[in-house]
Amino acid sequence: MVSDTRLQIHAGWLDSVKRSECEHFDCRPDPNDISLLVIHNISLPPGEFGGPYILDFFAGKLQPHIHPMFEQIYQMRVSAHLLIRRDGQIVQFVGFENRAWHAGVSSFQGRTRCNDFSIGIELEGTDNTEYSAQQYAALVRATHAIVAQYPLINLSRIVGHNDIAPGRKTDPGVSFDWGRYRQQIGFFYNS
């Protein structure tokens, strides 16, 4: 569960959150160009919450025999910087200074390869399942810490996966309340 204290970032890692370091990352071309925050959703198996499978997936340890869908994805090498569970627990997989592999083929304002300059946050959920109040609270806390550390990210540079990969991705989906989220983080910006 997430407490009410402010999160801090030290050497690219949030303090006071669970770490589940993975090998699915590499160096950013320019570590001074962290300028985009991308919000995703994930559930494994699809529509099921709370199990170990997201952590297994990002660690490259997903077992294909557990679920038919896993047979299609178990060899993929993907990751995100953060996962926010339904109960608000934050798990960090990759330090922000490094490039996580979350965006895939993507473009933002004419720039391709969004992984090069973005931070990826996965919300445990689906496009059509309402996110929990604990997830919004944790997301707001993580956003504040990220923006304080990486000021090139402003309100207009926080997007959904669907925004950078239209037609290919739909997350975080219609269930994500952008108005609620932006209202909760809006006071933090001078935009």
Image (cartoon, rainbow, N blue to C red):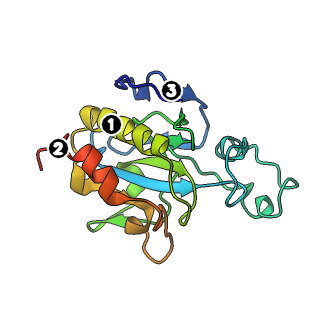
Q: Nearer the viewer, residue 15 or 85?
A: 85
One can see residue 90 in this view: yes
User: Residue under circle 3?
Assistant: 17
Point out the residue furthest to the right here: 65
Amino acid type indicated by mark 3: Val
Decide: is 164 above or below 11.
below
Amino acid type indicated by mark 2: Tyr
**Where residue 189 is drawn, which disc sits there?**
2
Asked if the residue under mark 2 is in contact with the one under mark 1, i.e. CB atoms within 8 Å, the reply is no
One can see residue 153 in this view: no
- Label 2: element kind: loop
Count residues near mark 2 (Cα–Cα under 10 Å), then give few for <14, some for 14-19, many for 20+: few
Q: Nearer the viewer, residue 183 or 44?
A: 183
* Residue at image point 59% right, 55% down: 42
* Residue at image point 57% right, 47% down: 79
Of the numbered discs 3 and 2, the one sitting upstream in the chain is 3
Q: Position of residue 107 (x, y in %)?
A: 36, 66
User: Residue under circle 1?
Assistant: 146
* Residue at image point 31% right, 44% down: 34
